[in-house]
Image (cartoon, rainbow, N blue to C red):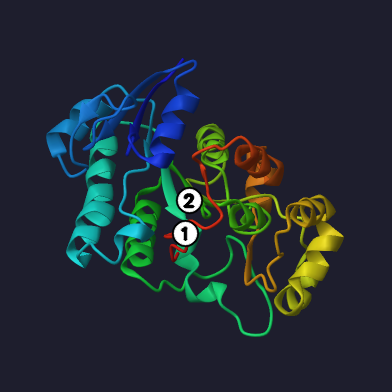
Amino acid sequence: MGRYVVTGSSGRIGSAIVRHLSKNNEVVGVDRAPSNFTHVIADICDHTALQRACAGADAVFHAAALHAPHVPTTPEAEFARINIEGTANVLHAVRTNGVKSLIFTSTTALYGYASQQEGQTSWINENTTPQPRTIYHRTKLEGEDMLQSAASDDLAVRVIRMSRCFPEPAPMMAVYRLHRGIDARDVAHAHTLALSHSGSPFEVFIASGQTPFQKSDQEELWHDAPHVIRRRAPDLAKAFDNRGWSLPPRIDRVYDPKRAITRLGWKPMFGVASVLSQYDGNSPEVLPLDAIGSTISE
């Protein structure tokens, strides 16, 4: 049994991490928004609150952040305060209290322009150089850089770059699980496995749905995605046919989670079948087919 701190514990990923950890551990959730998963109500830049929360912790999971949906309405200065200054505050609390492990929730969105190649599908892994487009991307990458500089033999830092994880219409969500989407429960599992990963002081892992596609499919995925989907993911194609849904004409990127699968022993469990089951069961996780607001830019 360990003692773990989770920042952003009222949020989508933070709450999933709290649920995953709470089965066998003492967990302290920190968030400025109250919820059943949060024990300390405090802003991420509250120095005193973070110091107290991290006292005696075995590890800290830092999921608190502003995200893509906040970009149109939130000043860039607030992004810097939460995503950069907040991360610096967590790092200070970790160091002061002698915490040995820090797991940082990041995003595949920070690859930005690298995910947009004309003429073929972009194949993205941890070796791909990020090319941030928005303040969200830039602040998350700056947070990663800060933690990489701080990582040492006394502080292991693991970064989980998670792919798209929004509630959205079933056809969109189901296809995304093949190449650029993930369930929050799978994200939480990757975080907890990263806790016990041994390696260099700083490691980065992509957490995204396990793709059936191969790199040799890149050009065809760009020009004729339905043909590739029918070949590589026939069950999804059949499910779409049965429901009268159209397959996407193009897939622009694939986030490859191979490193997390091989090095963490992780495997995403909630893929296409889970999305369809949630849709058929009227889960609020899967939006109606005509829902608006489902095109959040990463």
Instruction: From this view, report whether residue 18 is shown above or below residue 165.
Output: above
Instruction: From this view, report whether residue 89 is shown above or below residue 34.
Output: below
Q: Where is residue 149 shown, x and y percent of the image? A: 36, 55
Residue 90 lies in quadrant: top left
| Number of marks drawn | 2
Q: Is residue 55 left or right of residue 289?
A: left
Q: Where is residue 248 shown, x and y percent of the image? A: 68, 68
In the rendered image, is residue 172 in sight? Answer: yes
Extreme residue toward the bottom, this view:
119
Mark 2 secondary-structure assignment: loop
Q: Amino acid at mark 2?
A: Phe
Which of the marked residues, 2 or 1, is nearer the chain's N terminus? Answer: 2
In the rendered image, is residue 102 in sight? Answer: no
Q: Where is residue 296 shown, x and y percent of the image? A: 43, 62
Tell me whether circle 2 and circle 1 mark residues in contact (CB < 8 Å): yes
Q: Residue at x 34, y 26 (%)?
A: 37
Mark-to-mark CA distance, 2 and 1: 8 Å
Pair 2/1: label in front:
1
Residue 225 lies in quadrant: bottom right
How many C-alpha atoms fall within 10 Å of the one at disc 1: few (<14), some, or many (≥20)?
A: some
Q: Which residue is mark 1?
A: 294
Q: Amino acid at mark 1?
A: Ser
Q: Residue at x 27, y 29 (%)?
A: 54
Q: Which residue is mark 2?
A: 166
Instruction: From this view, report whether residue 8 is shown above or below residue 128.
Output: above
